[in-house]
Each structure stands twice: as structure tokens, then as C-alpha cells.
Image: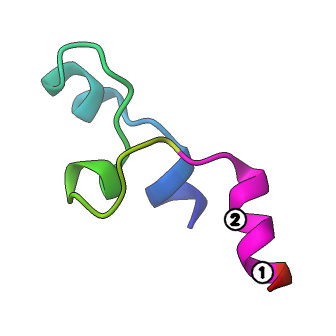
């Protein structure tokens, strides 16, 4: 979860012209870089 939703990847960010991009954003699964707190909130539901 962290790798795909929270961690910006250098190659993807370069391709997006400097906008911090995660694999989930590149795959159009989400529109923002998630915070760890958002993942924890999912687990507590």
C-alpha cells in the first residue's frame, strides 16, 4: 500500500514534469499522494 499510494517515484515524477507521482496515480487509481494516516484510517474501519 505504502509503495503504490504514498511513495513518490523519481522516474514517474520526472515524466510528470516535477509533479510528485505514485504508481497508483500513474495508473489513474487515485488523484493524490496518500498520507500514511489515510491508510491507517482504512484499516480501522
Tell me, for residue 43, which label it has, or none.
1
Instruction: Look at 39% across and 26% down and name the residue there.
Output: 20
Chief secondary structure of the magenta portion = helix
Q: Position of residue 15 (x, y in %)?
A: 14, 26
Name the residue located 79 percent from the left edge and 69 percent from the top edge.
41
Q: Is residue 30 left or right of residue 43?
A: left
Query: Which residue: 49% across, 41% down?
Result: 33
Q: Is residue 4 left or right of residue 2?
A: left
> Foreground: 18 or 44?
44
Q: CA distance from mark 1 to mark 2?
A: 7 Å
Q: Residue at x 59, y 58 (%)?
A: 2
Q: Which residue is mark 2?
A: 39
In percent of width and height, residue 26 lies at 22, 49
Asked if disc 1 and disc 2 are in contact, CB closer than 8 Å, the reply is yes
| Residue 35 against residue 18 in the figure, above or below | below
Q: Which residues are magenta?
A: 34-43
**Mark 2: which secondary structure?**
helix
What label does residue 32 carry, if any? none
- Asked if residue 19 is among those painted magenta in the image, a careful observer would answer no
Dot 1: few (<14), some (14–19), or many (≥20) neighbours within 10 Å? few
Q: Secondary structure at mark 1?
A: helix
Q: Quadrant of residue 44?
A: bottom right
Q: Say few, some or many: other residues with alpha carbon within 10 Å of mark 2 (under 14 / 14 to 19 / 20 or more).
A: some
In this rendering, the count of numbered labels is 2
In the picture as drawn, the residue positioned furthest to the top comes out as 18
Q: Residue most toward the right?
A: 44
Q: Is residue 45 above or below residue 12?
A: below
- Tell me the quarter of the image containing the N terminus: bottom right
Residue sticking out furthest to the bottom: 45
Amino acid at each position: 500500500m505504502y509503495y503504490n499510494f504514498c511513495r513518490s517515484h523519481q522516474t514517474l515524477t520526472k515524466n510528470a514534469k516535477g509533479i510528485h507521482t505514485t504508481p497508483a496515480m500513474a495508473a489513474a487509481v487515485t488523484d493524490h499522494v496518500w498520507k500514511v494516516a489515510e491508510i491507517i484510517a482504512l484499516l480501522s474501519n
